Amino acid sequence: MTSWTVKTRKKFSRLSLAWFMRSMLFASRLMPYSLGVLLGGLLGHLAFYILPRDRERAISHLTSVFGDKERAWIRRTAHRCFAHLGKAMLETMLLDPGRLSRVVEFQGHENLRRALERGRGAVYFTGHIGNWEMMAAAVAEKFPLSVIAAPLEPEQLSDMIVRLRAAKGVRTILRSRPGASRELIRIFRENRILGLLIDQDTEVEGAFVDFMGKPAWTPIAAASIAIKFNAPVLFGHITRVSNNKHRLTVEGPLDIIRTGDDTKDIILNTALFTKKIEECILRNPEQWVWMHRRWRRQP
């Protein structure tokens, strides 16, 4: 396959994804919330069968981590993962402020308030667990929240997601965009919360730390920023529970490691944060993104 063919296929896939997301966003405005969540689950089930590469990667990763489980459990968990993500997509589109308090039980919001009382802002780290976009909306309803995210391709898709977040009170800082560094500094001056997802292998500054028993390239931004700005650190996670409701839990401020060697401390704290995320995933494995190439790079 030529490089031109590969580039054309990737461009077509991205444009198709943008078209699909716009179509879903339009359709979501015409349906009740419960019907939308049901439709999202059905789309996730369909994706499990029509996306063989992602399905097999999810099954492979689950097998690697849960080698003692039966094949049927592995496949069932992968299937539930796709269904959960389909629901999460529609939930995010359908969500309005009046519904948040009815579908999200917020535990630990006093921890966020206690952190902000220090007046230095706060670093809030999490992973792609549960419906992380719904979590951001629930936090932003009560506290000033900004998040760091990578720009997506095509640009229309990235802009659409930024607008969806903004409608729920979440500011987005797109990495590598002009003004991103200034906006980051402003967050701590304004005593805002900075949210970061740190559980994926992406092209950012990172380090290899243990994740599920294997080294995984992990973003170090949460630890680095917390140390640089002397900001309190909190860990948040959200879980889908019965009747498609959600439980959001915020822990902290955490005691982070400080030896005086910033380089060493950044890696040690990144490993500490990653362990917190891992524990959540192991409790609800069907609610994490197993199709992501988490271990694609090795030392």
Image: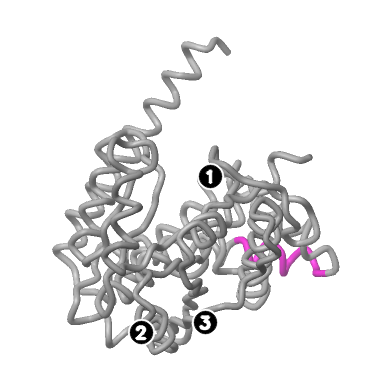
Residue at left offset 32%, top offset 37%: 177
Q: Which residue is mark 1?
A: 51
Residue 112 figure quarter: bottom left
The residues bearing labels 3 and 1 have C-alpha atoms spaced at a distance of: 36 Å
Name the N-terminal-most of marks 3 and 1: 1
Q: Name the quarter where the N terminus is drawn.
A: top right
Residue 44 magenta: no
Residue 174 figure quarter: top left
Asked if the residue under mark 2 is in contact with the one under mark 3, i.e. CB atoms within 8 Å, the reply is no
Give x and y (percent) for residue 178: 29, 35
Give the structural element (helix, strand or loop) at label 2.
helix
Tell me where the magenta segment starts and ends, as one range. 69-78
The residues bearing labels 1 and 2 have C-alpha atoms spaced at a distance of: 43 Å
Give x and y (percent) for residue 164: 23, 57
Name the N-terminal-most of marks 1 and 2: 1
Give x and y (percent) for residue 109: 38, 86
| Viewer-closest of 179 and 289 | 179
> Taking the image as drawn, is residue 259 in sight?
yes
In the rendering, which numbered label is found on residue 113? 2
Q: Name the quarter where the C terminus is drawn.
A: top right
Task: Tell me: residue 259, above or below residue 60.
Answer: below
In the rendering, which numbered label is found on residue 251? 3
The disc labelled 3 sits on which kind of residue? Glu
- Foreground: disc 1 or disc 2: 2
Helix, strand or loop: magenta stretch? helix
> Taking the image as drawn, is residue 38 in sight?
no
| Viewer-closest of 110 and 232 | 232
Task: Tell me: residue 263, above or below residue 16.
Answer: below
Q: Does residue 174 appear to the left or right of 130 in the view shown?
A: left
